[in-house]
Image: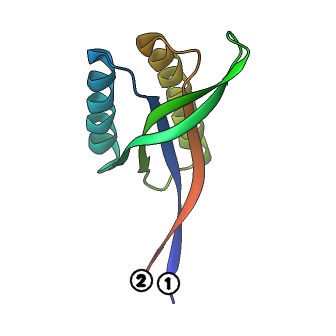
Amino acid sequence: MPKSRKRFRSEVYVPIIPHLVYYETRNRLIYEFSVAFGDCSVSDDLEGWYFSKAEDELIPDRITLIYTDTSPYTATEGQQLRRELESLQQTLAHDLGQEAILIALIPVEHVSED
């Protein structure tokens, strides 16, 4: 019977902007996620929308989704990961000059035959 292992999935939605900082940020996230968690997946040039509070309107957006699944975590380690992602969110918004950056932390279960 397959066993399940609880993990977290970290997803970072990076707005595509025509500046070098976007490419540097994208590549840095791919590297950091791969080193920290063993791998990551990337979906480039996705269609997105967001409501801009500054502009008071719905704005189309092109995004890159970078995500990874963690190793199994304790509750304390999960809280630390959440704090690190909150810090990353602020850094990315500043570096990319965006109102906000969406980062999701989602509990997932992997099914394995082990």
The mark found on residue 2 in the picture is 1
Amino acid beneath label 2:
Glu
Given residues 30 and 18, the one toward you in this image is 18
Left or right: residue 27 versus residue 3 is: left
Q: Say above or below: 96 vs 43.
A: above
Residue depicted at 42% across the width and 15% down the height: 96
- Where is residue 49? Give x, y as percent: 60, 33
Residue pointed to by mark 2: 113
Q: Residue furthest bottom?
A: 1
Q: Total of numbered circles in the picture?
A: 2
Sequence-earlier tag: 1 or 2? 1
- Where is residue 92? Give x, y as percent: 45, 19
Residue depicted at 43% across the width and 46% down the height: 67
Given residues 27 and 61, the one toward you in this image is 61
The mark found on residue 63 in the picture is none
Q: Say above or below: 83 vs 93.
A: below
Amino acid beneath label 1:
Pro
Given residues 42 and 33, the one toward you in this image is 42
Residue depicted at 28% across the width and 28% down the height: 28
Q: Say above or below: 14 vs 38.
A: above
- Where is residue 19? Give x, y as percent: 31, 16
